[in-house]
Image: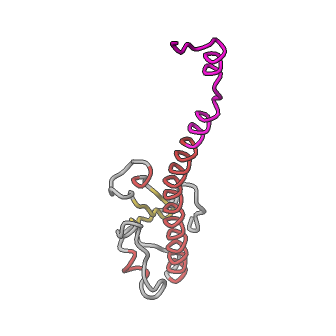
Amino acid sequence: MAATSSPSSAHDKSRRSPLPWVAVVFAVALVVALVLTAFRRRDPEQAQHIHADFTLILGALERYQADHGGQLPEEGSLDELLVPRYLPAVPRDPWGRPYQYASSAQGVFLSTFGRENQRGGAGENQDHTNHDGHQQLLR
């Protein structure tokens, strides 16, 4: 006798639970979310580090300015201006380069151009300045 499938067994196969597929989709989505979160955390940490450095440098420049009759050079090396009297060492950006400095009647401008050291970009290549949402100590 040949085995025939009964209508009820075919009906049972078509009613399989979607739960295993839902679990797989959920697990993949969770892994993707965790990976993206890990990558996104690096940029804010670098930005926080950079802007903490800006705060330190701006504080030292404020002390320099107070000692020099309210004047700051228009440009120059932060190392020459601040070390050793105002800072033991001027911090470097996360890629080991000195921060850029300029001063004018409008105030002090500190910047770094990100990992690639070129203007523009996003993520690690994003430019950072002391005017992109951080308290300006010198006016």
Q: From which residue to which does the magenta span run?
A: 1-27
Closer to the camera, 71 or 64?
64
73 relative to 6, above or below: below
Question: Measured from the top left, where is residue 11 in percent x and y?
Answer: 64, 16
Q: Nearer the viewer, residue 104 or 31?
A: 31
Residue that appears at 53% across and 42% down: 28
Q: Looking at the image, what colour scheme do you see? A: secondary structure
Number of marks in picture:
0
x, y percentage for residue 138? 56, 68
* Residue 121 among those drawn in magenta: no
Q: Position of residue 8 (x, y in %)?
A: 66, 15
| Percent of width and height locating residue 66 | 55, 80
- Give the quarter of the figure containing the C terminus: bottom right
Does the stretch in magenta take in 22? yes
Residue 38 vs residue 57, the one in the foreground: 38
* Residue shown at the point (40%, 61%) measured from the top left: 112
Q: Is residue 20 above or below residue 120?
A: above
Q: Is residue 111 above or below residue 28?
A: below
Q: What secondary structure is the stretch in magenta mostly built from?
A: helix
Q: Residue furthest front?
A: 1
Q: Residue at x 58, y 60 (%)?
A: 134
Q: Nearer the viewer, residue 123 or 69?
A: 123
**Residue at image x 33%, y 57%?**
117
